[in-house]
Image: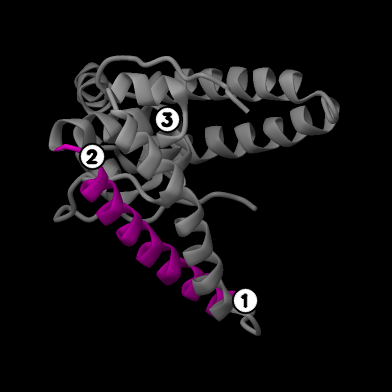
């Protein structure tokens, strides 16, 4: 799979809530501590994860029999539905200040790959040239991750460390594409650094 970037529309805004892919963060001890989740919220987050997984499985059954562009389009539509439902669940689970910080943490973990979203690209005011270079960087990172997973197969710790190093390096390359004003925008979007704890 090769990444591409969609045209940026000027009327779009940065995402206000993380999508379904961020649920693993609510289960992470480092994120839970950063967000100051109480015991009830931790329990609710633990219960939410399997519910979202079941919902995803239910919706993705609708992809059966679809191929090519039709499957891609339908998967995109279903993913948007899932992200919306997950966002509503996060808003119900977290206090407003926690949700704001959760969004920052999610962007930190997703890094430059989040810039492919038109709304975020618009917020950062990425040029078409920057977007094209970003896609190349992310595609190279994808290849490096596959190689790392192949080379460290069977050693989960080594794989995790290698993937994390690639993520950090990729984000550094991407940030180098930005102007100083764009860097400041990105820093505001991600907030203070947080420490991710690999607890698996």
Residue wearing tag 1 = 68
> Earlier along the polypeptide chain: callout 2 or callout 3?
2
> Earlier along the polypeptide chain: callout 1 or callout 3?
1
**Magenta stretch mostly in which secondary structure?**
helix
Residue wearing tag 3 = 111
Residue placed most toward the observer, 54 or 108: 54
Identify the mark at residue 99; answer none if there is no mark.
none
Question: Is-magenta flag for residue 90?
Answer: yes
Residue placed most toward the observer, 25 or 77: 25
Q: Residue at x 46, y 34 (%)?
A: 27
The crowding category of the residue bearing disc 2, from other C-alpha atoms within 10 Å (few below 14, some 14 to 19, many at least 20), is some
Q: Nearer the viewer, mark 2 or mark 1?
A: 2
Q: Nearer the viewer, mark 1 or mark 3?
A: 3
Label 2, secondary structure: give it: loop
Q: Residue at x 44, y 48 (%)?
A: 47
Question: In whole angstroms, how far apart are the C-alphas of marks 2 and 1?
Answer: 38 Å
Can you see residue 177?
no
Question: In whole angstroms, how far apart are the C-alphas of marks 1 and 3?
Answer: 29 Å
Rendering coords of residue 153 (x, y %): 84, 30
Residue 16 image-quadrant placement: top left
Label 1, secondary structure: give it: helix
Residue wearing tag 2 = 94
Q: Nearer the viewer, mark 2 or mark 3?
A: 2
Residue bounds of the magenta highlight: 68-95
Image quadrant occupied by the C terminus = top right
Q: Residue at x 27, y 15 (%)?
A: 192
Residue 40 image-quadrant placement: top left
Residue 116 image-quadrant placement: top left
Question: In whole angstroms, how far apart are the C-alphas of marks 2 and 3?
Answer: 22 Å
């Amino acid at each position: 799979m090769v990444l591409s970037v969609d045209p940026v529309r000027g009327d779009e805004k940065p995402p206000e809530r993380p999508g379904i892919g961020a649920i693993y963060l609510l289960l992470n001890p480092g994120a839970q501590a950063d967000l100051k989740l109480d015991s009830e919220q931790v329990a609710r987050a633990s219960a939410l994860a399997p519910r979202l997984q079941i919902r995803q499985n239910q919706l993705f059954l609708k992809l059966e029999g679809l191929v090519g562009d039709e499957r891609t389009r339908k998967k995109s539509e279903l993913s948007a539905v899932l992200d919306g439902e997950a966002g509503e669940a996060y808003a119900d689970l977290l206090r407003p200040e926690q949700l704001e910080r959760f969004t920052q943490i999610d962007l930190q973990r997703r890094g430059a790959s989040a810039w492919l979203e038109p709304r975020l690209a618009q917020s950062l005011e990425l040029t078409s040239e920057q977007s094209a270079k970003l896609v190349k960087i992310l595609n190279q990172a994808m290849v490096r991750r596959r190689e790392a997973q192949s080379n460290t197969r069977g050693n989960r710790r080594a794989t995790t460390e290698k993937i994390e190093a690639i993520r950090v390096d990729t984000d550094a390359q991407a940030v180098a594409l930005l102007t100083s004003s764009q860097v400041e925008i990105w820093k505001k979007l991600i907030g203070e650094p947080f420490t991710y704890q690999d607890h698996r």
